[in-house]
Image (tube, rainbow, N blue to C red):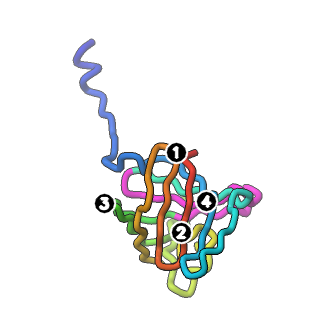
Amino acid sequence: ILSALCSCDTWSSDNGQIDGMWYLSELDSVSNNQSINYRERKVFWSFQGTILQLHSASCPKELEKKYMCAFDYRNNSLRVYSVSLYDRMNGNKYLSEEEISEVRKFGINSLDETFRIESLSERVMILKGSKLRLVFEHY
């Protein structure tokens, strides 16, 4: 019995508190400090391993698009890059700079963007980019 228990692999990441699903609740403009309540848009960022998934649950399921990104999390910064449209059947399609508008509703303004982590706890994460401050609640 002991050998059966030891042969099971368990996988975990070193992402700490950032792992899991986060609900984007507020967007703040860095330039003019105006805030937008984002709760009704039902935007989620989900971190696992080295992958970040972006999706919005406010669309009907058949119209909902999901996006995948790579991310690096270290030293109070979060780099999000290699943004692609998630398409399990046909393969993911990487976005071009001309297609960046597709992911702006998720708070991302560049295909390679670095955010400073202003706050990170079990319940709240606040990220500051060059244009926006994003306030998340752990889901």
Crowd around label 3: few <14 · some 14–19 · many ≥20 (10 Å): few
Which tag, 2 or 3, sits closer to the chain's start? 3
Please, what secondary structure does the residue beneath circle 2 have?
strand
Image point 60% across, 58% down: which residue?
A: 24
Highlighted range, magenta: 49-67
Compute the Cα span from label 3 to label 4: 24 Å
Asked whether 53 or 121 is in front, the reply is 121
Name the spot of residue 37 as percent of width and height, x first.
70, 63
Q: Amino acid at mark 3?
A: Arg
Compute the Cα span from label 1 to label 2: 17 Å
Asked whether residue 53 is drawn in magenta, I would say yes
Please, what secondary structure does the residue beneath circle 4 have?
strand
- The residue labelled by disc 2 is 133
- The residue labelled by disc 1 is 123
Name the spot of residue 97 as percent of width and height, x first.
51, 85
Crowd around label 1: few <14 · some 14–19 · many ≥20 (10 Å): few
Name the spot of residue 63 as percent of width and height, x first.
73, 63
Q: Quadrant of the C terminus?
A: top right
Asked whether 12 or 2 is in front, the reply is 12
Image point 66% across, 59% down: which residue?
A: 56
- The residue labelled by disc 3 is 74
Looking at the image, the residue that sits furthest to the bottom is 98
Say if mark 3 contacts mark 1, CB within 8 Å. Answer: no
Which tag, 3 or 1, sits closer to the chain's start? 3
Compute the Cα span from label 2 to label 3: 18 Å
Image point 43% across, 52% down: which residue?
A: 120
Which numbered marker is on residue 55? Answer: 4
Please, what secondary structure does the residue beneath circle 1 have?
loop
Query: Which of the 4 image quarters holds residue 44?
Result: bottom right
Which of label 3 and label 4 is nearer to you? 3
